[in-house]
Amino acid sequence: MKQLGTIFRFEFKNYAKSKSFLILTVLLVVIIGVVLDLPRIQQFIGSRSKPAPAEMETVAVVDKTGSGRIAASLSAAIRDKKFEAADADIGALKRCVEAEKYASAVYVESPLRYTYVVKNIGLYDDTKEEVGNVLLSVYRAQALQQYGVPAADAQKLLTAQVKADVVQTAQGKDQAKNFFYTYVMIFALYMAILIYGQLVATSVATEKSTRAMELLITSTKPANLMFGKVLGAGTAGLAQLALILGSGYVFYNLNRAYFADNSVVRSIFGMPLSILLYALMFFLLGYFIYAFLYGALGSLVSRMEELSQAVMPVTFLFILAFFIVMFSMGSGSVDNAAMVVCSYIPLTSPMAMFVRIAMGNVSAWEIAVSTAILAASTIGIGLLAASVYRMGVLLYGKAPKPGEIFAMLRNR
């Protein structure tokens, strides 16, 4: 245990004191602080200098229906644009819009048909849909009046709203509410495994390429070396994540009042404690199982140039699992067959089972089985990685294939 502790402390200090670690941590804390302080900063700047109100876009309206109500109806329904009646054909409207005399134009040919003339169609330009809704309302109001319904009653019928109350059961999940903090935690796990797993592999490969591994293996056990490296890097990564997320929580509470109407931010920082504990558990187990694999693969290469090719299969598998989880989250079907299967495979369960816990319907026994398989696999792969590490000391030249590795381990 003394050797393990010595290696752990060395590796932790090596990561924690590195310039890249410190710069990245400080940079992310500053970015989070600025983002969460932005509403306060905007309010302060706004109170010091009140900008002139932005001029509304002018939209030309040509009404060929003869009702004379289209422009007024559009102005009453769409308040962020100025609708101006005009008399021109399509060609003239195109020239006016091209010359920026109007921001856009609406040419109403009949009660249910119109042409929208615009120069650039913005990513969030919903004028076409808004105009269509207004024209449909005008058409329906006129139709009701023709059938003898008074204008006031027609207006009530057209503006009637259905009210609904939602009652959620105690065991149910609100996927829309839980999506954002689930995404943040999955992305944090994804980045941590890729970054720190690669760092473990790089550290091991560096020791072997400089032949420092041959000295280390004579003074301590391979298991102590492997577990010390992985635990040191994992603790450094966990400390970094805690600093980043902790600073975000502090900045959020300092500016909580400014996010009262922002459901996304409130959802992220309103994560239940139980979900946070599950995230921490799967984060640790997921990191360790991949870090052991990266460390074992790093011990098999003789040159740093070969490292990326050696770890590619594990990286590809992890990225594939990430995409399966992201696709399932985006579709809302987090309990599909692929996710259920991935929940019990050790290399995919850290993400798949966590997402099902946060957004799906999963029983306690499923969580227990998945966690037990993952924990046992992590320990097993850790011991296997230590054996591969010990064997890798003497392996130079071309990295052996998986079948050759298992044959050598079996012979030992």
Image: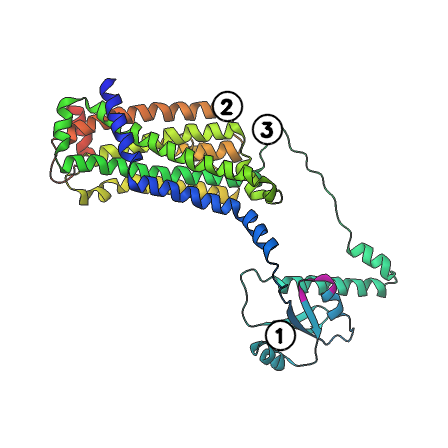
Label 3 crowd (10 A; few <14 / some 14-19 / many >=20): few
Label 3 secondary element: loop
The residue under the point 36% across, 43% down is: 24
Which residue is under mark 1?
Answer: 102
Look at the numbered disc 2 and give the secondary structure of its residue: helix
- Please name which of the two marks, 3 or 1, marks the residue nearer to the observer: 1
Determine the residue positioned at 13% across, 40% down. Answer: 398
Residue 364 is marked as: 2
Rendering colour mode: rainbow
* Stretch in magenta: 76-81
Graded by Cα atoms within 10 Å as few (under 14), some (14 to 19) or many (20 or more), the crowding at tag 1 reads many
Question: In terms of image quadrants, where is residue 97?
Answer: bottom right
Crowding at dot 2, Cα within 10 Å, few <14 / some 14-19 / many 20+, comes out as: few
Q: Is residue 331 toward the left or the right of residue 308 in the image?
A: right
Q: Amino acid at mark 3?
A: Gln
x and y, in percent, of residue 365 in the image: 48, 22
User: Which residue bears the numbered disc 3?
Assistant: 171
Front residue of 339/311: it is 311
Alpha carbon separation for disc pair 3 and 1? 55 Å
Q: Is residue 46 left or right of residue 288?
A: right
